[in-house]
């Protein structure tokens, strides 16, 4: 294993949501502004993607057009997928949330605080999560592979040709599957809290948190606010079962086979106080993604990007600029 570099890292901004149903048609007479021309020059996306964003923000005051977080829906693999966009930078970043996570629960400080002059952010609610309901979530054996397929098709529908990925926990696993399946699509990737396989110890840890009644109010409330107690309780338990199925029915292999196919420049971040993901997981991912970097946060836990969002955002921006 190559050397690890450790640095000590050591806290809701206003959000405006505008709902857009599906793609919008470019309004007659809508002029492509200088920012959009700069974005188009990169070749990272089809012109319709930037025109969609420009159209969605057209009625907002000028001082809000860059910072506004705009809500969209698209039909992806037969289901309605909700996603949000913000920023007007040349580099496009797709953000993938964790288990039962959503754009709003998982990436608030990234959507509001990452540099929107450098980056255009696209944050996705996987099917059955967040505002991608209906449909109700289902849990096939390879549910993470299905999420990756949905993300790939969303990129195709939007005309995204080159992206970077941010993936947390299950979203990190989805990101690695995506980057392994479509290496030409992904230029850079940051993952944290993920695992390419599951162990008996991992399953025991998941069983310990199956009953959401044992969670603190602070941990439960964001999920119950979105889903309600019944939906969240049911599907969190089903998530534990689905993780166990990877262990029992897939020889514990979540996405080990995908790692060797990843060509994206990759940063793996790990919180040393993460109670769910042991250090063996980022070590394995680091050892099996060629040229990857591993960054350890001594005080970080599983949600390190939420608690230490300033430090995390700086780390991400520094990595993406390399």
Image: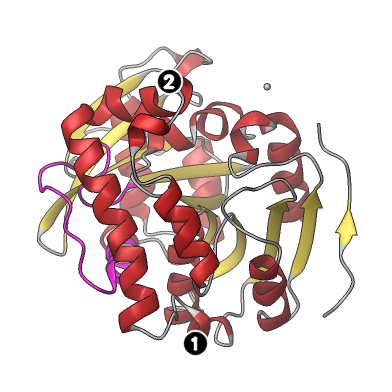
Q: Residue 207: which numbered mark, if any?
A: none
Q: Is residue 147 visible?
A: no
Circles 1, 2 touching at the beta carbon (< 8 Å): no
Residue 250 figure quarter: bottom left
SS under mark 1: helix
Q: Earlier in the sequence, mark 1 or mark 2?
A: 2
Residue 208 in the image: above or below residue 306:
below
Crowd band around label 1 with a 10 angstrom C-alpha radius: few (<14), some (14–19), many (20+)? some
Q: Residue 218 at what x, y percent from top left?
A: 47, 21
Q: Residue 25 at what x, y percent from top left?
A: 17, 42
Which stretch did the figure color magenta?
125-153
Residue that appears at 42% across and 80% down: 181
Residue 18 in the image: above or below residue 257:
above
Q: Nearer the viewer, residue 261 or 119?
A: 261
Q: Residue 271 at what x, y percent from top left?
A: 71, 48
In the image, taking residue 108 as reference, residue 1 lies left or right, namely right
Q: Is residue 145 magenta?
A: yes
Q: Quadrant of the C terminus?
A: bottom right
Residue 294 in the image: above or below residue 227:
below
Label 1: which residue?
257
Q: Is residue 308 visible?
A: yes
Residue that appears at 23% across and 47% down: 235
Label 2: which residue?
217
Q: Residue 65 at what x, y percent from top left?
A: 45, 23
Mark 1 vs mark 2, CA separation in Å = 38 Å
Crowd band around label 2 with a 10 angstrom C-alpha radius: few (<14), some (14–19), many (20+)? few
Q: Nearer the viewer, residue 212 or 145?
A: 212
Q: Quadrant of the N terminus?
A: bottom right
Residue that appears at 35% across and 26% down: 57
């Amino acid at each position: 294993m190559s050397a690890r570099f450790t640095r000590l890292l050591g806290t809701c901004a206003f959000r405006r949501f505008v709902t857009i149903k599906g793609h919008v048609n470019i309004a007659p007479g809508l002029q492509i502004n200088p920012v959009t021309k700069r974005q188009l020059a990169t070749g990272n996306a089809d012109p319709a993607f930037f025109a969609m964003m420009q159209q969605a923000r057209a009625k907002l005051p000028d001082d809000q057009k860059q910072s506004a977080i705009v809500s969209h829906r698209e039909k992806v693999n037969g289901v309605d997928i909700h996603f949000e966009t913000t920023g007007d930078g040349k580099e496009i970043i797709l953000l993938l949330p964790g288990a039962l996570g959503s754009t709003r629960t998982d990436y608030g400080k990234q959507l509001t605080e990452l540099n929107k002059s450098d980056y255009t952010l696209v944050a996705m609610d996987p099917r059955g999560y967040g505002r991608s309901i209906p449909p109700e979530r289902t849990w096939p054996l390879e549910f993470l592979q299905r999420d990756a397929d949905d993300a790939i098709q969303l990129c195709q529908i939007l005309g995204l040709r080159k992206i970077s990925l941010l993936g947390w926990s299950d979203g990190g696993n989805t990101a690695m599957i995506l980057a392994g399946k479509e290496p030409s699509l992904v230029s850079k990737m940051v993952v944290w809290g993920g695992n390419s396989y599951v162990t008996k110890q991992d399953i025991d840890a998941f069983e310990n948190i199956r009953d959401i009644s044992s969670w603190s109010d602070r941990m439960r409330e964001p999920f119950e606010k979105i889903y309600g107690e019944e939906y969240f309780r049911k599907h969190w338990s089903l998530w534990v079962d689905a993780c166990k199925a990877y262990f029992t029915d897939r020889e514990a292999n979540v996405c080990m086979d995908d790692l060797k196919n990843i060509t994206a420049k990759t940063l793996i971040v790990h919180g040393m106080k993460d109670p769910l993901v042991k250090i063996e997981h980022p070590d394995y991912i680091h050892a099996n993604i060629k040229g990857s970097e591993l960054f350890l946060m001594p005080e970080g836990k599983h949600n390190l990007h939420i608690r230490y969002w300033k430090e995390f955002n700086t780390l991400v921006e520094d990595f993406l600029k390399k």
